[in-house]
Each structure stands twice: as C-alpha cells, then as structure tokens.
Image (cartoon, grey):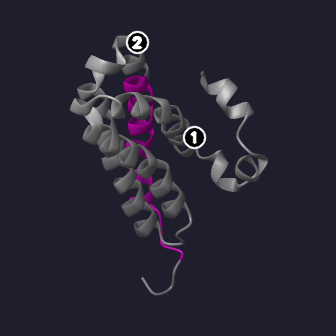
Amino acid sequence: MNYAEWESNVPEVITTDVLWTVTAYRLSLFVADIGWADTGKLARDARTRSLADQLYRSLGSISANIAEGYSKSGAKDRARFYEYALGSARESRDWYYKARHILGDEVTNHRLAELTSVIRLLITMIPRQRAAPNLRSDE
C-alpha cells in the first residue's frame, strides 16, 4: 500500500483534527499502519518474534508521542515529547534493519526511507520548539 491509498482510507475524525496538519504525525501513523503486516510476518518466525513486538511498540510510539506533544501548551513539553518520538523513530529504523532478512530488501528499504523522513522532520521540529516562547505562565 502506498501513502496516497492509505491516506484516502484514514477516518475523517482523524483527518479533520488539526494534528493532521503535522506531516511527521501523518507519516508516522502511516508507517505504524503498514508495519502491522510486517510485524505479523516477523511474529511467525521464532527467531524474530520478540523483534516483532519491539518493532510494533516502537512504531506506535512515534505518532503517539507526536500527538501527545502537540497537545501540550508549553514549548518545552512539546519538544520533550517530540524527542521521545525521535527516539522511537530511530529505534524503529534499527529494528527494521535487523528484520531485513525476513522482510526482504524492497520492504526494508521502503520502511527505512519513510522512517528517515520522519526523523528528519522531527530533527527540525525539536529545535523550533526549544526556541519558542512558552505559553504557560507557570514556566
């Protein structure tokens, strides 16, 4: 499945949320969704069963942390959650590389490229948040 096909099937309740405007969120949600089939394939092989679990948890963590960070009113809080997302994106990329023997080069290279795009976006988002003034009066 490519991104355009996937995006056309995302429920409106998600796509009409202002969070949907965050490209890193959309891409990370896409990668987690397509990772479902990948982790299923990995779970069928005893050698990669635990890898499948780790991969799926790290994939899900990327968009979840972006969503949580986006919901924070303080820039420092947002940056912290975006950093968690960055860590999960790098972790996911690492797990995908280790899974290449089962998933094959084409799937692995696609997932590595998508995750690298998310990582690059987060690397630009974090310093912007760190430099932004806090909106909260208690910080």
Q: Residue at x 40, y 34 (%)?
A: 39
* The N terminus, quarter of image: top right
Q: Main secondary structure of the magenta part?
A: helix
**Disc 2 from disc 1: Cα separation:** 24 Å
Numbered disc 2: secondary structure: helix
Q: Residue at x 54, y 46 (%)?
A: 25
Q: Amino acid at mark 2?
A: Glu
Quick one: 78 or 60, which is closer to the camera? 60
Q: Residue at x 72, y 46 (%)?
A: 15
Q: Where residue 130 appears, x then y in whole percent?
A: 39, 60
**How would you rate the neighbour count of disc 2 (Cα within 10 Å): few for under 14, some for 14-19, many for 20 or more?**
few
Q: Residue at x 40, y 68 (%)?
A: 76
Taking the image as shown, residue 100 lies to the left or right of residue 128, namely left
Q: Amino acid at mark 1?
A: Thr
Q: Which residue is mark 2?
A: 106
Q: Where residue 16 appears, x then y in whole percent?
A: 76, 51
Q: Which residue is mark 1?
A: 23
Discs 2/1, front: 2
Earlier in the chain: of badge 2 and badge 1, it is 1
Q: Where residue 70 appears, x then y in whole percent?
A: 54, 60
Q: Which residues are magenta?
A: 111-135
Quick one: 57 or 134, which is closer to the camera? 57
Asked whether 129 falls inside the magenta stretch, the response is yes
Q: Is residue 45 above or below residue 86?
A: above
